[in-house]
Amino acid sequence: MLENSDEIAEGLNILLHMFPNTKIYVGIENNKNDAIDAMNKAVSGINNIEIVALKTKYPQGAEKQLIYAATKREVPSGKLPAHVGCIVQNIATVHAIRNAVVLGKPLTERVITVTGGSIKTPKNLRVKLGTSLKELVQACDGFIVEPAKIISGGPLMGTALFSLDIPAIKGSSGVLCLSQKEWDIAPESNCIRCGKCIDACPMFLIPSKLNSMVLKGDYDSFEANHGVDCIECGCCTFVCPAKRHLTQTCREGKRRVLSKKKK
Ligand code: SF4
Ligand code: SF4
């Protein structure tokens, strides 16, 4: 947003042409005043675009949280944003739309963060899609120490990788290479019913209950208890003193329920 604010404003204008009578909210966390100022300047003079300074908290970027923060509309359980008349687009997508319409240029590259205690020189890299993750690590001067865990994405929502011999794709946001010290977590133990996961869940779910349903293979109860509303934010796993694999089981439960519906 800092480097391409005018181009993003062009992309927003294109969206306004595609969806007339629409209002666009651009949500930016309120600790990024430079981005807020840059975007306010770029969209000045364009009607129906409002830059909204959002409270800096996690998770704030999920669709349902963003819609509520910007419009105070609540997306009901099991429904999509369109149900409340909203569409959520990543700002990088808006920029890609602008490049496609104005320059006729397809999406061929994206910015990927390469970081973690094992990386010698952490960087944000603009890379061509298809570049191997191994080359990205090499561009950051390689490892200081061998990573104990490699994650595609961020620390809370990312997916563990078994190899760096895979390409960057349009959904790749980061490569996190954690050292043994950073990955030194206790083994999973029994739930002590402390309720911390319930307090932490932004979707008002009961992660401990969903976890036990998935472990029993009771996917009907998982669905009845709104498990598919889980946004896989990782907050429950992060706060759990018993190190229960709550997010992973919710992800598995959602996968099972959705694949059953497709049959
Ligand atoms: S990952 Fe955990 S905290 Fe986050 S929405 Fe799912 S159940 Fe709730
Ligand atoms: S935070 Fe962990 S230990 Fe506490 S109730 Fe939830 S699953 Fe059980």
Image (tube, helix red, strand yellow):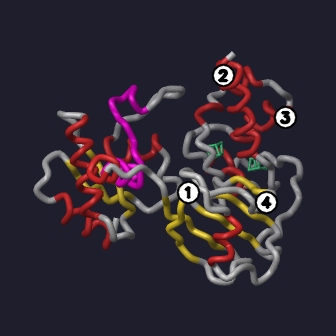
Q: Are marks 3 and 4 in contact (CB under 8 Å)?
A: no
Indicate which label's residue lies in the foreground, 3 or 4. Answer: 4
Q: Sequence-wise, which precedes: disc 4 or disc 1?
A: 1
Is ligand 1 less than 8 Å from the beta carbon at label 1?
Answer: no
Distance between the alpha carbons at the discs numbered 3 and 2: 16 Å
Residue picked out by circle 2: 224
SS for callout 2: helix
Q: Sequence-wise, which precedes: disc 4 or disc 2?
A: 4
Does 86 appear in magenta? Answer: yes
Q: Quadrant of the N terminus?
A: bottom left
Relative to residue 172, is residue 84 drawn left or right?
Answer: left
Up/down of 48 relative to 41, above or below: above
Amino acid under label 2?
Ala
Amino acid under label 4?
Ser
Distance between the alpha carbons at the discs numbered 4 and 1: 17 Å
Q: Residue at x 80, y 81 (%)?
A: 145
Residue picked out by circle 3: 215
Amino acid under label 1?
Leu
Q: Residue at x 80, y 50 (%)?
A: 244
Q: Sequence-wise, which precedes: disc 3 or disc 1?
A: 1
Q: In the drawing, what numbered circle is on residue 163?
A: 4
Looking at the rendered structure, the number of numbered marks drawn on it comes to 4
Distance between the alpha carbons at the discs numbered 4 and 2: 37 Å
SS for callout 1: loop
SS for callout 3: helix
Distance between the alpha carbons at the discs numbered 2 and 1: 40 Å
Pick the residue in front: 143 or 29.
143
Q: Are marks 3 and 2 in contact (CB under 8 Å)?
A: no
